[in-house]
Image (cartoon, grey):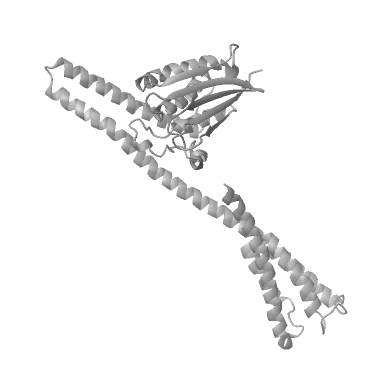
Amino acid sequence: MQSESIYPRRARWQGYVLAVGWVGAALLLRFLLNPVLGQQGPYLILTLSIVLAALYGGFGPAMLATALGTFIGTYLFIGSRPGWESVFETPNITRTVLFLLIGLSISVIGGRLRASRQELSEAVKGLRSSNRAKDHVLATVAHEMRSPLSALNSANQVLARSTQDPARIVWASELIGRQLTQLSRMSDDLMDMSRVLHGHIDVKMDPVDLRHVLSSAVEQCGPLMAEKRHQLTTGQPPEPAMVRGDASRLVQVFANLLTNAAKYTQPGGQISVRLALVGHEWHVSVADNGQGLDPEAIDEIFEPFVQAPDALINAKGGLGLGLAIVKRIVDLHGGRVSASSPGPGCGSSFDVRLAQAA
């Protein structure tokens, strides 16, 4: 982030410095040609320096080139000799004003051209990012579907060969059920993400007690945390924690955060859920001591299909939609969600802030 803020400032200063250099070069060239040109076109070569300053630096450097060219060029090349004696003659004033107007016009056009180039550059970056995201989506979906489909194929073969073995039939049936649940979950995530991104999600704003929301979310994630023997600690106030929101969608938010914590926390790890009132906002913190996050990747973690670095080797990696859905739902509730982590291997924390209901 620091390098991004320094670079534009340095580029602007380079534009001003180069504007001064181009004006100096134009003045030198005009001075060398003065025996030939005399009073013919005193500002013609100086106009080129304004054009170059506008193309590289935009409005500000071009205006600097205009001001320097006007002041120095007028002193040196207006009249029969350097000085101010003939500057205020009507023809010379006209030429000076015309040069100023030309310089101003070039500066405005250069400023707009520079802004257009920057917008085009950002658009190209966005298109490249979208293209990479598309490729990543295809690779992720293909990877995530491979395991369930392979398991379903194995179960089908077992059923075909073991029609008289009740134990194998039960095993295959349970396997099929689990894999179909996983495929159904991926389908639901994709459909949910599509509705959220296109604004087709229904949110019913009613008074909701966050304590009940968190209890439901913990209940949903209980089997996964029990499977990995996680130690869950909770903390919440005794009084109701009222917000205005959609209870089912808020349960989805915190269930996704808890599921995410459980996925990337080693067996026997610790997960905590804290609810507290800070000012006029309810803060919910879901923290773990799992694999943590790279600080440089935190800004992108809420984008669709963005996953932890080793998510693809995690059997329960998912499609990388959970946190994106969390952010969209929290935004629809007028709240904020953020992530923090000391670094890889040091755990992470996700904080949701929702306005207290009046």
On screen, residue 164 versus residue 3, left or right, reads: left
Q: Position of residue 325 (x, y in %)?
A: 48, 30
Q: Is residue 293 above or below residue 352?
A: below
- Identified at 46% across, 50% down, the residue is 128
Q: Position of residue 173 (x, y in %)?
A: 23, 20
Closer to us: 247 or 197: 247
Q: Residue visible at 17% across and 16% down?
A: 167
Q: Residue furthest top?
A: 238
| Residue at the image position 67 percent from the left and 76 percent from the top | 25
Q: Quadrant of the C terminus?
A: top right
* Residue 93 located left or right of residue 210: right
Quadrant for residue 226, please give it. top left
Asked if one can make out residue 204 in the rendered structure from this viewpoint, the answer is no
Query: Residue 136 is drawn in which quadrant?
Result: top left
Q: How many marks?
A: 0
Q: Residue furthest bottom?
A: 35
116 with respect to 213 (left or right): right
x%, y% of residue 34?
73, 85
Which residue does the image show at 72% across and 63% down from the upper left?
Answer: 63
| Residue 180 in the image, given as x and y percentages of width and height | 30, 25
Asked whether the viewer can see residue 183, the reply is yes
> Quadrant of the rendered structure where residue 95 is?
bottom right
> Does 322 appear above or below 242?
below
- Asked whether 285 or 280 is in front, the reply is 285
